[in-house]
Image (cartoon, helix red, strand yellow):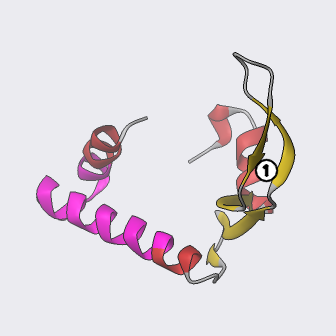
Amino acid sequence: MVRSEIISKLSDKIHRKIKKSELEEILNILIKMIVEGVRDQKNIELRNFGRFSQKKIKEKMNARNPRTGEKIQTSEKKSIAFKMSKELRNRINKSEDKIN
């Protein structure tokens, strides 16, 4: 599902009529806040959904260039880790008929 589909589905489900442009702005703000929180090394937890956190990937020498086969040293990187909540895991593993 892409951003435009998410906004369309939100627009269909909301009883009050909020413009799609306003929903898009709300979604952009939410994503921006998650990214800023993770960048500041804070865990972002959305109850009953999951937790976003920063993960450091150490530098290593064992990476290889696929064309030449030579070893390359990769520098330390940061990545985002997501751990889903128990409720989300349960909802995903149940049949779709039971999900609201």
Residue at (33% x, 44% y) in the render: 3
Residue at (13% x, 57% y) in the render: 21
Counting every numbered tag in the picture gives 1
- Label 1 sits on residue: 90
- Name the outermost residue toward the right: 62
Residue 26 counted in the magenta span: yes
Residue at (75% x, 66% y) in the render: 56
Give the left or right position of residue 80, taking residue 86 as reference. left
Q: Quadrant of residue 9?
A: top left
What span is colored magenta in the figure? Answer: 10-35
How would you rate the neighbour count of disc 1 (Cα within 10 Å): few for under 14, some for 14-19, many for 20 or more?
Answer: few
SS assignment for the magenta stretch, majority:
helix
Which of 99 and 48 lies nearest the eye of the viewer?
48
Residue 57 counted in the magenta span: no
* Residue 18 visible in this rendered orientation of the protein: no
Residue at (49% x, 72% y) in the render: 34
Residue 52 location (% of width, % of height): 65, 67
Give the left or right position of residue 20, taking residue 14 as reference. left
Q: Quadrant of residue 96?
A: top right
Residue 63 location (% of width, % of height): 81, 37
Which of 76 and 68 lies nearest the eye of the viewer?
68
Which of 76 and 5 lies nearest the eye of the viewer?
76
Residue 60 location (% of width, % of height): 84, 52
The N terminus is located in which quarter? top left
Give the left or right position of residue 100, taking residue 26 as reference. right
Q: Quadrant of residue 31?
A: bottom left
Give the left or right position of residue 46, taking residue 36 as reference. right
Residue 15 location (% of width, % of height): 23, 60
Above/below status of 100 relative to 97? below
